[in-house]
Amino acid sequence: MAARKEVLENLLTFIYGGKKGSETYTELLSILNSAQPGPGLRMFTHKDAFLISYGDMLAPPEHKPDKSGDGGTGLARLRKFLEHRNRGSFSYLHLLPFHPYTSDDGFSVMDYGQVDPRFGSWDDISALGGQFKLVFDFVVNHGSVQSEWFQSFLAGDKTHEGWYITRPKDYDSSSVVRPRTSPLLTPFIRNDGSEVYVWTTFSADQVDYDFSNPAVLLEFVNIFLEFVRRGAKIVRLDAIGYLWKEDGHPCIHHPKTHAVVKLFRAIAEALGLDVLILTETNVPHAQNVAYFGEGDEAHMVYNFALPPLVLHSMLSGDAGPLRCWAKTLPSPETGWIFLNYLASHDGVGVTPAKGLVEDAAFAATVEEAKKRGALVNYKNSPDGPIPYELNCSYLSITAPPSLGSTEIRVRAFLAAQAVLFSLSGLPAVYFHSWIGSEAWKEGPELLGYNRAVNRERPPMDRVEKELDDLRSLRSLIYRGINRLLRFRQSEEAFSPTSAQKVLDTDGSVFALLRGPVERRWVLCAQNLGSSSVTVHVREAGVPLGRIDLKPWETRWIALGTGGRREISTITE
């Protein structure tokens, strides 16, 4: 504990300077001394996988309008659905923000201490914690303009004086990096009638906190500890890269932002908490992995380059950039743990692919995605607005009806998911991918923003009915994902720390070897294209030889001690 305290003090001195850092350290110790120590970290295994979901992911049944038959709260409906449908596929549940909010589907938080009544209560969260290890979203960069904190700030209350970042109306923001085209500063009228311009990185409803004020940091330490007390096993630091602002700096990836992430990890370690830090930084790969620090920062980072690279492979038939990038990933033995995903509540980030795919080739992929129904969000740059993310259903873009039959579409989508499941790290699946949802085309117009295309809340009974139809697209995808995850859970070579080797294949094939673990390997071969191909595996000690793959086929072959077994998406 003494060594951890020294780390905490050094970090706070770096963030705030000698005198203020020392004072903040004393206050932090008071908070930590009243916190409940934990049992220490548990380790991930090959049996772990994440499901990403909103608390109100499923709407009440269409044909049971009475209160007694609507499944209860949104969180209660989700729990009931997962009790019936999960069947061991997922061990972690990432609950997207469930607090009272005013916009951005939860990411404009009004009160971090409450559960939005539209979703349910802390009791509902606790009940889900009995089924899953929970991941909580920690929206640290900004909060709602309707929060008591910001209203107190506008009222001139000294309690929240200095909690938000203000600048003059004519502030030069040209050097500030942010993923939006809206104005950086938003005007507000204080209770005394004066005008104040507040920093709003993401929208006029989301005001940025000023972490140069130690009171803000200490308040968020209290929230972090409360999340752990409420059952969070992983805390996801949302939009963390933008946390620290300094005039003349791009205001992204500031050294003091990294120090704040390290501080949260050091707090968890000082108290022996069973909680991991996950950072969300949707930026180019080298900047993203910097949040691992020297093994003293995030425990996990998202593999943000994976979604656009798999998308490019699927739409172009060229898995070359995906193979080249995957070969550069650090060995799992380094302790770096990636959270691998393809689809999420947001879109497919474009910037993480920068430098990994030729500009012209990726521009063609973006255009093809738009033809298949993807929408585009833009951000400002010195050259004007440029694409920032594609908003789409990953299913609708990678396996559109134009591919052919339902069987072909399912096979294609499962090939993309199989890449995700095969890589070292932990797989995370967005709820709509798991249940085979296509684009909610009416969503953007109904709700007024592009991301709605992948945020539908379908009625629970309609989803259940379609999953029960064994020939439906939903059911085939749902069962195919579960089948791949079951195979993954049965082979220790998929352990997050197990070695992987990306094979030298051509064209549309992405193949790798996992292991060995206890003298056992798994070959994962995915054909991400529309033509049949042959893979020749010539690895010492791995007697596989020639592997034939039909269009969009996935074949996983486990062999070594214990015999050979395999799975293919061609046959059940």
Image (cartoon, grey):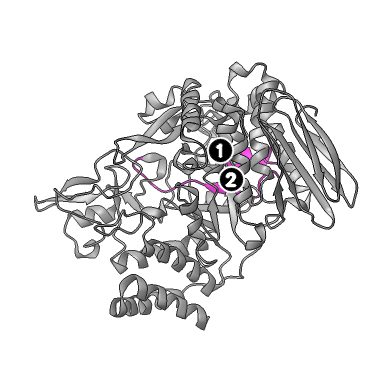
Q: Identify the residue under disc 2.
A: 325
User: Which numbered disc covers residue 37?
Assistant: none
Q: Is residue 83 magenta?
A: yes
- For the image shown, how many numbered marks are present on the structure? 2
Spatial CA span between label 2 and label 1 = 9 Å
Residue 540 or residue 397, whichever sits in front: 540
For the point 55% across and 23% down, which residue is it? 63
The answer to which image quadrant residue 83 occupies is: top right
Residue 129 or residue 301, whichever sits in front: 301
Marks 2 and 1 close (CB-CB < 8 Å) = yes
Q: Is residue 126 visible?
A: no
Residue 57 or residue 23, whichever sits in front: 23
Image coords of residue 155 (percent x, y): 17, 55
For the point 63% across and 28% down, which residue is it? 464
Q: Identify the residue under disc 1.
A: 309
Amino acid at pointer 2: Trp
